Image (cartoon, rainbow, N blue to C red):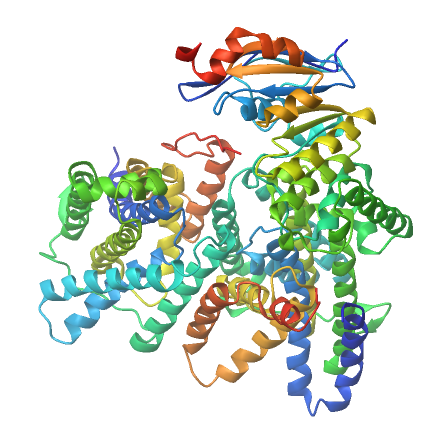
C-alpha cells in the first residue's frame, strides 16, 4: 500500500486531464492541488510535530501579495518576487516563533492567529500598494521567456508541484530530522534527553511550513491573476487546519485527501449562504471528537497495515 | 578523576527542599546505585544531573567540566543518557524508531538532504535501522522488531527505553527504576542486562527499589533520606550502617 | 491632562471593561480544565445579538437581557458536555481545534438566523453625554463600568465566600484531590463553562449600545479578551481585569495618537511584546513542570 501510493497519485494526476469535461473542473482540481500542497506543509507542523498555526493564510497572503506588489509597483521579475516573499515570510515566522516556542501550545495558537490577523489588516490598509479590500491584479508568471497561461498549462505546473511536495514530505518524515520532530510530539522530555533541541526543531518546521505556504501563495496569485485580502483571512487559515484534521494528522496522503474533500465542499454548499461556516465548524468538532486521527490513518488501520 | 562529581547539590520546590546538600562521586566503569525511601529525592537528583531541573545550588561536573545549567539536549552530546521512572516513550512511532531516535546526535540531521533522499543520509539511516534492531535484540525485544510502540506491554517498554538510551552510545547511563512494576523473572533479566551493559564499559547510575537487585549488582551505593545523603559505600557497608537500617525500618524500630 | 487624552482614556476603559469580562471567562475555563476556549468571543456576540433579537420580538428589556445571558450560558454547558467532555484527555492541539469548531458553528448559525447586518441597541438610560474636563462621557460607559465592577466583586465574593466557589478553586488546583474530598468535578466544569459564557454575554450586551454588533464580532472581541488574559498572566483573575483595562486603554490611545486603521492590530502587537519580555504576564505564577 505504502509503496503503491506515490505511483498511484502520479497515475491519477496523469490521467485526470482525460476525464475533466471543462475549465470549471480544471480550475477545481487545480485548487485542490494548491490546497493539498499547503496542507502538506501545515501537516508537518500540526500532525507530525504537534504544534499549531492558525495564521497560515497570513503566510500565504504574504507570498501572494509579494508576487502582486513587487512586479507591479517596483518592476521586479516575478521569480525574484516569489523568492523575496518566501524569504520574508520565513524571517517573519522565525522572528515571531522564537519567544513563543519556549511556551505552551495555547500561546502558539493565539500568536499565530494574531499574526495572521495583523498581516490581513496590513494588506487591507496599505491601499496605495495593495488596492485595499478591492484587491489587485497580478502580472503573469514567465519563466525562461515562456508565459504560463490557461488552466491546462497551470494544471501541469501544480500537478508536478504536488507530486514533488508529496515526495519531499515523505522523505523528510522518514529521516533523522523527521524522526526528531515526531519524537518531540510523542514525548518532549524523551526527545530532549536524546539530544533534540526542542526550540530549534519546532522553529525549523514552523519556518519551513510558512515558507511552503508563501510560495504557494505566490503561485496561486499568478494562476488566478487577481487577489483580494480574503486570501489572508482567518477563515482561510481555519479551512487549511480543517483539511489537515479531516485527512489525517501526520499522514502525507491524508493531507491530499483532506484538501480534495474540503475544496469540493464549498462548491457543494455554495447555494446555502452561511451554512459553509456551520459545516466547517461541525466537521472540525465531529472529527476531533470521533475520528481524531482523521480519515486516511483510520481507514489504513482498519484495512490492514497502512501508514 | 571521577567521571561524575556532585558537590553540595540542592533543589527547592517552593518551600520544600527535595534535595539538600548532596555530594558524591561516580568512578568510570562502575554500577552506582541511589536508594532511599519513597520521596527521598532520588528522581529529583536524576532530574538535576540530567538537566531536566535547574538546581537551587551546588556543583555537578562531568569529566571535570561543570555541567550545571546545561539543557538536556547538550548533555546528550556529552555522553549522558537516561531512562524514566514513568515511561517516556513516543507512542506515535514504531518501537524501532524509538530506538533510532536515541542515536539522534550521531546522524546527519540536515533538512534539505533529508527531503531529497540524499544517498549518504539514506545509507547511514538504513545502517542505523539495522543497529536499532540489534539493540532491541540485545535488550531482549526480539519479538517486537516490527511493532508500533503503542502495542507493547509495560515490561517491554521499560526495555525499549534502555535500548533507546544505549543507541546514543553513552558513557554515563542513568536508569530510573528499571525494574519497577516487573515480576521477579523480568527483574532478574533486567539485572543481568545491566551487568552486561556495565561490562561493556558504560558507567551506570541506578535508582532502584528492589533491594535484592541493588545489593547484587552495585559497586557502590548512595542512600538518600528526606533529600539528604544518609550514607555511601559498598553494599556490605551500607547494609551494616545503623542509620540506613533506621531509615528503612522507621526510626522508632531501631 | 488634555481633553483628547481624557476622551481616549474613557473609551479605552469602557472597551477594556468588556475585554476584562472576556478575559475572566477565559481564565475561569482555563483554571478549571486547562483548556483555552476559542469560542469565548462568540458568547460576547450572542449576548448582544440575542438582546437585539428578543427586543425586536417585543419582549421588555430586562427579560430580553436575562434571556441573552441565560441562553449563552446554556450554549456554554452544551459545549462542555457535547464537545469537551467526550474528547477528555486529548492533546492541547485537539482541544484548541474543537473549541474553534464550536466557535465557527455558533457564528455560522448566527449568520444564518440573524443575517449579515449590523444591529444596535438603545442605551440603557439617558442619551445626554456628560462633560468632564472637556471630554465626553456617555452614560452607557458608566453602565459598562458599573456592571463590570459589580460582576467582578460578585465573582470575588463567590470564589472566596461560597462553598461552590471554593469547590471550583479546589478543582483547578488539583482535580483528583478535589474529587477525593467529594467535589463533583464534572459539575464544576459545567458550572465554569456556564459562568464563563454568561460573563462574555454580559460584556456583549453592555457594549452593543456603544459599538453595534453583528454575527462576526466574536472573533475579534474574543481574541482581545485572550490577549488581555495573557497580558494579565494566564490563570489570574485580578490579572485578567487589569489586562483587559490595559489592552482597552492602549488600543484607544494608539487609535487616537497613532493610526485608527491599525487599531485592531495593536492588541496583537502587544501580545508579542508581552511574550518576548514578560512571558508570564503581569500576575502569572511561576510553575515548575514535574517529570
- Occupied quadrant, residue C214: bottom left
Q: Residue furthest bottom?
A: A21
Quadrant, the C terminus of chain B: top left
Q: Residue at x 77, y 69 (%)?
A: A163
Q: Residue A100: x, y in percent?
A: 54, 41
Answer with left or right where residue A38 lies relative to residue C291: right
Residue C210 drawn above or below residue B240: below
Q: Residue at x 41, y 46 (%)?
A: C267
Q: Residue C207: x, y in percent?
A: 24, 56
Q: Nearer the viewer, residue B91 or B156?
A: B156
Quadrant, the N terminus of chain B: top right
Q: Nearer the viewer, residue C231 or B72?
A: B72
Evaluate whether residue C253 shows in this view: no
Q: Residue at x 47, y 44 (%)?
A: C269
Q: Residue B56: x, y in percent?
A: 52, 16
Evaluate whether residue C150 shows in this view: yes
Amino acid at each position: 500500500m505504502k509503496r503503491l501510493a506515490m505511483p498511484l497519485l502520479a497515475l491519477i494526476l496523469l490521467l485526470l486531464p482525460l476525464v475533466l469535461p471543462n475549465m470549471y473542473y480544471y480550475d477545481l482540481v487545480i485548487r485542490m492541488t494548491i490546497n493539498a500542497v499547503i496542507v502538506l506543509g501545515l501537516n508537518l507542523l500540526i500532525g507530525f510535530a504537534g504544534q499549531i498555526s492558525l495564521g497560515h493564510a497570513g503566510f500565504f497572503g504574504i507570498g501572494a501579495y509579494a508576487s502582486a506588489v513587487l512586479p507591479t509597483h517596483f518592476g521586479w521579475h516575478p521569480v525574484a518576487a516569489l523568492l523575496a516573499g518566501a524569504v520574508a515570510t520565513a524571517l517573519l515566522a522565525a522572528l515571531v516563533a522564537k519567544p513563543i516556542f519556549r511556551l505552551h501550545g495555547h500561546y502558539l495558537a493565539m500568536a499565530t492567529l494574531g499574526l495572521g490577523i495583523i498581516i490581513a489588516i496590513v494588506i487591507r490598509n496599505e491601499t496605495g500598494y495593495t488596492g485595499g479590500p478591492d484587491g489587485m491584479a497580478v502580472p503573469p508568471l514567465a519563466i525562461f521567456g515562456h508565459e504560463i497561461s490557461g488552466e491546462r498549462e497551470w494544471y501541469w505546473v501544480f500537478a508536478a508541484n504536488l507530486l514533488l511536495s508529496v515526495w519531499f514530505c515523505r522523505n523528510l518524515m522518514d529521516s533523522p530530522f523527521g524522526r526528531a520532530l515526531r519524537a518531540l510530539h510523542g514525548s518532549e522530555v524523551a526527545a530532549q534527553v536524546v539530544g533534540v533541541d526542542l526550540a530549534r526543531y519546532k522553529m525549523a518546521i514552523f519556518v519551513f511550513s510558512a515558507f511552503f505556504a508563501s510560495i504557494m501563495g505566490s503561485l496561486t496569485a499568478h494562476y488566478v491573476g487577481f487577489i483580494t485580502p480574503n486570501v489572508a483571512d482567518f477563515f482561510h487559515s481555519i479551512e487549511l487546519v480543517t483539511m489537515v484534521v479531516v485527512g489525517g494528522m501526520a499522514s502525507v496522503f491524508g493531507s491530499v485527501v483532506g484538501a480534495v474533500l474540503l475544496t469540493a465542499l464549498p462548491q457543494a454548499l455554495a447555494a446555502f449562504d452561511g451554512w459553509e461556516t456551520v459545516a466547517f465548524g461541525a466537521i472540525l468538532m465531529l472529527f476531533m471528537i470521533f475520528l481524531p486521527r482523521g480519515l486516511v490513518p483510520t481507514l489504513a488501520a482498519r484495512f490492514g497495515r497502512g501508514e | 578523576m571521577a567521571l561524575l562529581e556532585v558537590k553540595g547539590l540542592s533543589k527547592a520546590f517552593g518551600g520544600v527542599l527535595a534535595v539538600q546538600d548532596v555530594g558524591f562521586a561516580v568512578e568510570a566503569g562502575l554500577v552506582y546505585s541511589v536508594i532511599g525511601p519513597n520521596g527521598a529525592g532520588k528522581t529529583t537528583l536524576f532530574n538535576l544531573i540530567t538537566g531536566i531541573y535547574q538546581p537551587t545550588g551546588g556543583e555537578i561536573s562531568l569529566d571535570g567540566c561543570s555541567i550545571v545549567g546545561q539543557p538536556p539536549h547538550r548533555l546528550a552530546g556529552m555522553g549522558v543518557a537516561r531512562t524514566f521512572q514513568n515511561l517516556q516513550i513516543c507512542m506515535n512511532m514504531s518501537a524501532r524508531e524509538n530506538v533510532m531516535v536515541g542515536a539522534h546526535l550521531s546522524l546527519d540531521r540536515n533538512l534539505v538532504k533529508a527531503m531529497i533522499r540524499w544517498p549518504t543520509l539514506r545509507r547511514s539511516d538504513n545502517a542505523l535501522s539495522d543497529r536499532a534492531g540489534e539493540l532491541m535484540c540485545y535488550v531482549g525485544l526480539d519479538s517486537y522488531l516490527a511493532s508500533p510502540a503503542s502495542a507493547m506491554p509495560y515490561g517491554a517498554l521499560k526495555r525499549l527505553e534502555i535500548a533507546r538510551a544505549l543507541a546514543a552510545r553513552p558513557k554515563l547511563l542513568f536508569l530510573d527504576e528499571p525494574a519497577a512494576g516487573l515480576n521477579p523473572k523480568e527483574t532478574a533479566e533486567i539485572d543481568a542486562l545491566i551487568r552486561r551493559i556495565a561490562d561493556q564499559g558504560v558507567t551506570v547510575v541506578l535508582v532502584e527499589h528492589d533491594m535484592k537487585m541493588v545489593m547484587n549488582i552495585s559497586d557502590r551505593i548512595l542512600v538518600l533520606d528526606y533529600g539528604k545523603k544518609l550514607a555511601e559505600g559498598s553494599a556490605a557497608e551500607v547494609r551494616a550502617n545503623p542509620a540506613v537500617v533506621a531509615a528503612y525500618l522507621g526510626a522508632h524500630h531501631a | 491632562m488634555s481633553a483628547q487624552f481624557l476622551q481616549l482614556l474613557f473609551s479605552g476603559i469602557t472597551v477594556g471593561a468588556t475585554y476584562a469580562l472576556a478575559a475572566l471567562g477565559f481564565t475561569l475555563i482555563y483554571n478549571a480544565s486547562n483548556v483555552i476556549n476559542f469560542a469565548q468571543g462568540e458568547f460576547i456576540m450572542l449576548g448582544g445579538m440575542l438582546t437585539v433579537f428578543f427586543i425586536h420580538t417585543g419582549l421588555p428589556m430586562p427579560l430580553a437581557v436575562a434571556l441573552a445571558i441565560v441562553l449563552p450560558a446554556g450554549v456554554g454547558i452544551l459545549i462542555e458536555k457535547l464537545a469537551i467532555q467526550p474528547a477528555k484527555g486529548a492533546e492541547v492541539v485537539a482541544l484548541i481545534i474543537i473549541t474553534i469548531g464550536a466557535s465557527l458553528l455558533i457564528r455560522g448559525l448566527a449568520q444564518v438566523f440573524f443575517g449579515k447586518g449590523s444591529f444596535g441597541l438603545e442605551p440603557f438610560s439617558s442619551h445626554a453625554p456628560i462633560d468632564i474636563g472637556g471630554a465626553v462621557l456617555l452614560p452607557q460607559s458608566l453602565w459598562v463600568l458599573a456592571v463590570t465592577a459589580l460582576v467582578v466583586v460578585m465573582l470575588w465574593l463567590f470564589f472566596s465566600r461560597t462553598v461552590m466557589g471554593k469547590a471550583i478553586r479546589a478543582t483547578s488546583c488539583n482535580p483528583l484531590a478535589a474529587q477525593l474530598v467529594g467535589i463533583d468535578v464534572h459539575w464544576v466544569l459545567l458550572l465554569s463553562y456556564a459562568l464563563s459564557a454568561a460573563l462574555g454575554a454580559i460584556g456583549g450586551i453592555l457594549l452593543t449600545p456603544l459599538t453595534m454588533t453583528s454575527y462576526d464580532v466574536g472573533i475579534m472581541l474574543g481574541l482581545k479578551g485572550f490577549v488581555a488574559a495573557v497580558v494579565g498572566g494566564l490563570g489570574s483573575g485580578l490579572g485578567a481585569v487589569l489586562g483587559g483595562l490595559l489592552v482597552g486603554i492602549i488600543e484607544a490611545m494608539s487609535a487616537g495618537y497613532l493610526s485608527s486603521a491599525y487599531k485592531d492590530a495593536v492588541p496583537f502587537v502587544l501580545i508579542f511584546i508581552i511574550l518576548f519580555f514578560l512571558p508570564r504576564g503581569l500576575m502569572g505564577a511561576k510553575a515548575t513542570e514535574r517529570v
